[in-house]
């Protein structure tokens, strides 16, 4: 339950507490968030530290992981505060900031996956020209564009909040979102509704078409090349499979949330459960998928963890010797 202090008072009384406010539930959310931080933080650290991974695919993976961290951090800490303290108040501007981050996460995840599909298309269909096309400058331009598009689209969406008076007090959601805040408006928000639906449809359809086109061409190229070399086909499927699985994961999670809110018979607790899972499941699973599928990333993780563990053991031995000499 959330209340807007300062300018407005909001409360979210959707049975969120009855669903999660048990000692086990509190511990689960903490464990999930720690898992998100450790898994995604490890992937980002390895990609940054290992210069051999400073390649387009891994740079884009790093951007996707940062996007996951944004989404999880926007929602889960607030949920944990609610669990641990029972605090249900949130100021107006923090509510807007949380909603902005939530929607940026949703759009940026799609645009980054679209850029990754384009990268895989160039790598498979134009292998000889890949490094000439996907230069360092173009790579960073594509990543920046993915974030810029998301930020601009969401900035326009939240521009509709300016000078909109709120009459309601209760946010019927687990977290603050554009729709949950504007549903409290004293006046109709038709323009915001039209823009929001148009933006969602345009982004989702556009990214779907980009990914569909890329994978149709990739499939054609892999089947053609696989006639002469079966290793080529298996390598293509291994490289592109992780990207496709992650895209489907986001889409399935989004569809489940949308459908749950379209059927009144679905219990409020179940709707909230599906909503919160959108910020837990993809951020936890994505590092696992890339860690298992990408041999280079997996090897680098094992190497760095082994070196770190060995260094810790050596330090313990040195301290032990110093301690022994001191007592002698």
Image (cartoon, rainbow, N blue to C red):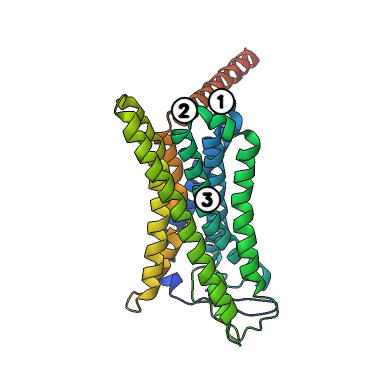
Seen in the picture, residue 172 relative to 275 is either above or below; the reply is below
Q: Position of residue 248 (x, y in %)?
A: 38, 52
Mark pair 2, 3: CA separation: 21 Å
Q: Quick one: label 1 or label 2, which is nearer the N terminus?
A: 1
Task: Name the residue tied to disc 1.
Answer: 52
Quarter of the image holding residue 20? bottom left
Q: Is residue 164 left or right of residue 281?
A: right
Q: Position of residue 95 (x, y in %)?
A: 62, 69
Mark pair 1, 3: CA separation: 23 Å
Q: Position of residue 23 (x, y in %)?
A: 43, 60
Q: Classify mark 3: helix, strand or loop.
A: helix
Seen in the picture, residue 1 relative to 118 is either above or below; the reply is below
Q: Residue at x 58, y 81 (%)?
A: 189
Mark pair 1, 2: CA separation: 9 Å
> Which residue is more in the foreground, 215 or 1?
215
Q: Quick one: label 2 or label 3, which is nearer the N terminus?
A: 3
Which mark is drawn over residue 296? Answer: 2
Q: Quick one: label 1 or label 3, which is nearer the N terminus?
A: 1
Q: Classify mark 2: helix, strand or loop.
A: helix
Q: Classify mark 1: helix, strand or loop.
A: helix
Mark 1 vs 2: CB contact within 8 A: yes
> Which residue is more in the foreground, 174 or 163?
163
Task: Name the residue tied to disc 3.
Answer: 68
């Amino acid at each position: 339950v959330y209340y807007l202090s300062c300018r407005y008072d909001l409360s979210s009384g959707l049975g969120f507490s009855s669903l999660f406010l048990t000692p086990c539930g509190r511990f689960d959310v903490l464990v999930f968030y720690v898992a998100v931080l450790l898994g995604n933080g490890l992937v980002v650290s390895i990609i940054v530290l290992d210069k051999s991974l400073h390649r387009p695919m891994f740079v884009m993976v790093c951007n996707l992981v940062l996007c996951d961290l944004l989404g999880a951090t926007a929602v889960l800490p607030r949920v944990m505060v609610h669990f641990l303290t029972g605090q249900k108040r949130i100021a107006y501007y923090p509510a807007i900031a949380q909603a902005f981050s939530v929607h940026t996460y949703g759009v940026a995840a799609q645009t980054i996956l679209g850029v990754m599909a384009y990268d895989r298309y160039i790598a498979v269909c134009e292998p000889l020209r890949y490094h000439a096309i996907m230069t360092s400058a173009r790579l960073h331009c594509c990543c920046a564009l993915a974030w810029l598009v998301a930020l601009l689209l969401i900035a326009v969406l939240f521009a509709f909040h300016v000078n909109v008076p709120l009459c309601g007090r209760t946010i019927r959601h687990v977290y603050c979102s554009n729709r949950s805040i504007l549903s409290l408006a004293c006046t109709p928000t038709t323009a915001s509704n039209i823009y929001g639906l148009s933006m969602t449809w345009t982004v989702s359809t556009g990214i779907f078409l980009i990914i569909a086109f890329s994978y149709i061409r990739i499939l054609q190229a892999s089947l053609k090349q696989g006639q002469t070399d079966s290793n080529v086909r298996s390598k293509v499927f291994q490289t592109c499979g992780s990207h496709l699985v992650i895209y489907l994961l986001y889409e399935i999670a989004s569809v489940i949330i949308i459908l749950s809110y379209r059927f009144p018979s679905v219990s409020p607790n179940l709707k909230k459960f599906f909503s919160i899972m959108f910020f837990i499941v993809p951020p936890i699973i994505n590092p696992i998928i890339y860690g298992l599928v990408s041999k280079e990333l997996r090897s680098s993780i094992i190497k760095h963890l082994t070196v770190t563990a060995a260094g810790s053991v050596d330090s313990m031995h040195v301290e032990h010797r110093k301690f022994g000499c001191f007592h002698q």
